[in-house]
Image (cartoon, helix red, strand yellow):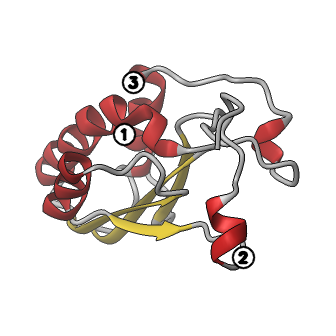
Amino acid sequence: MSHGFRRLDLFVTEACNLSCSYCFAASKPRRAPSFEVCFSAIEWMLESDFKENIHITFWGGEPLLRADLLRRMVPATRALAKERDIRRLGFSMPTNATLLDEELLRWIVDEGIEIFASIDGDEATQAGRPLRSGLS
């Protein structure tokens, strides 16, 4: 069944590695959908009547806690989009950037995933965000 949507906001986790008191993720259960559940949503999205400018945003909590899932999902989505003749498929995700390392950042750049970082204030506030582990 086709539809007229171009954007999908896909919550890949409710968990976060930070424990900021103001954030909804601090009080949420820690559910995380399987690859199959996430990909079924993507399959539905790619049934759009539109064949260009389709965009998927991976949300959380902290989406990079599911980096292994994202590394499977992005190429599988690209392959399906190619099968369905979808042009200009885009990906994005918010991140607190605390889990970024050189390898993960290289993968994000290579895949053309747009990231937007959550910044919680001035430098001291940003540096003092509490990790879920209780460490700073």
The residue lying at 58 percent from left, 24 percent from top is 32
User: In this image, 31 relative to 67: left or right?
Assistant: right
For the question of whether residue 60 can be seen, the reply is: yes
Q: In screen coordinates, is 111 left or right of 95?
A: left
Q: Tell me whether circle 3 and circle 1 mark residues in contact (CB < 8 Å).
A: no
**Tag 3's secondary structure?**
helix
Q: Earlier in the sequence, mark 2 or mark 1?
A: 1
Q: In the rendered structure, find residue 118 and report the number of the disc placed on it.
A: none
Q: Nearer the viewer, residue 128 or 110?
A: 128
Hey, what amino acid is under mark 3?
Phe
- Report x, y in % for residue 84: 19, 51
Residue drawn 63% across the image and 38% down it: 16
**Where in the figure is residue 66, as x and y percent of width and height?**
43, 33
Q: Is residue 128 above or below residue 6?
A: above
Q: Which residue is mark 2?
A: 121
Mark 3 or mark 2: name the one nearer the start of the chain. Answer: 3
Quarter of the picture holding the C terminus: top right
Residue lying farthest to the bottom in this orientation = 122
Local crowd size for mark 1, using a 10 Å CA cut-off: few (<14), some (14–19), many (≥20): some
Label 2: how many residues lie within 10 Å, few (<14), some (14-19) or many (20+)?
A: few
User: Would residue 46 appear left or right of 131 to someone viewing this image?
Assistant: left
Q: Is residue 19 above or below residue 94?
A: above
Disc 1 target residue: 43
Determine the CA span between mark 3 and mark 1. Answer: 12 Å
Instruction: Give the percent coordinates (x, y) of residue 14.
Output: 66, 35
State the CA–CA distance, disc 3 to disc 2: 34 Å
Which residue was labeled with disc 3?
35
Secondary structure of the residue carrying tag 1 is helix
Mark 1 belongs to which amino acid? Glu
Residue type indicated by callout 2? Gly
Q: Is residue 119 left or right of residue 36?
A: right
- Residue 27 at what x, y percent from top left? 86, 34
